[in-house]
Image (cartoon, helix red, strand yellow):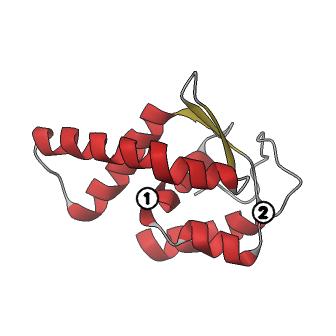
C-alpha cells in the first residue's frame, strides 16, 4: 500500500462517506481489490481493463495460478461484474468516477476510507 508520507497527487471530494458506507464498500473482496489498485496509483486513474487485470491478479494471488482458458473466463466474469455492479456502487458512493466513453475510472481520495482500506490490506495480505 501507499507510503503514508508520500505526497498525493490525487483529487479529493468534499463528501466523506459514513462509516456504514465505508464498511459496506469494503465488505466485498472485489471492491477492495479495485480500491487497493486505484489507491496505489499515483494519479488514481486506470482503465477498466487495467482494473480487471489487477482484480484477476489479486484473486489468483490468493488461489494460485490457473489455466489460461480459466483466466480468460475469469476476466470476462470479473469485468462484467465490475462494470455492472461494483464500479457503479463505488461511483454512487462518491469514491470514484467512471467515464463510460473512455472506460476509465478515477479514484477520489477519501481519508476515512483509506484508513480502513490500509488496515484491510494488511490483514488480507500480511
Percent x, y for residue 114?
A: 69, 63
Q: Nearer the viewer, residue 4 or 70?
A: 70
The residue at 54%/28% (across/down) is 103
Q: Quadrant of residue 120?
A: bottom right
Which label number is shown at residue 111? 2
16 vs 71, left or right, is right
Q: Is residue 62 above or below residue 19?
A: above
Q: Is residue 100 left or right of residue 50?
A: right
Question: Where, by quadrant of the figure, is residue 46 drawn?
Answer: top right
Q: Considering the image in quadrants, where does the N terminus appear?
A: bottom right
Taking 76 as reference, is 34 left or right? right
Question: Where in the figure is residue 44, as x and y percent of width and height?
Answer: 66, 40
- Farthest right residue in view: 14
Q: Is residue 126 visible?
A: no
Q: How many marks?
A: 2
Q: Which residue corresponds to the image point at 84% horizontal and 50% vertical from the top-left?
A: 13
Q: Nearer the viewer, residue 6 or 72?
A: 72
Amino acid at each position: 500500500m501507499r507510503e503514508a508520507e508520500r505526497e498525493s497527487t490525487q483529487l479529493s471530494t468534499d463528501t466523506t462517506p459514513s462509516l456504514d458506507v465505508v464498511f459496506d464498500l469494503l465488505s466485498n473482496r472485489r471492491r477492495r481489490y479495485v480500491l487497493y489498485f486505484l489507491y496505489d496509483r499515483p494519479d488514481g486513474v486506470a482503465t477498466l481493463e487495467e482494473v480487471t487485470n489487477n482484480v484477476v491478479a489479486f484473486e489468483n494471488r490468493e488461489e494460485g495460478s490457473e489455466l489460461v482458458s480459466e483466466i480468460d473466463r475469469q476476466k470476462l466474469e470479473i469485468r462484467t461484474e465490475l462494470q455492472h455492479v461494483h464500479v457503479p456502487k463505488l461511483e454512487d458512493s462518491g469514491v470514484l468516477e467512471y467515464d463510460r466513453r473512455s472506460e476509465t475510472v478515477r479514484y477520489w481520495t477519501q481519508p476515512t476510507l483509506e484508513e480502513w482500506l490500509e488496515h484491510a490490506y494488511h490483514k488480507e495480505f500480511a
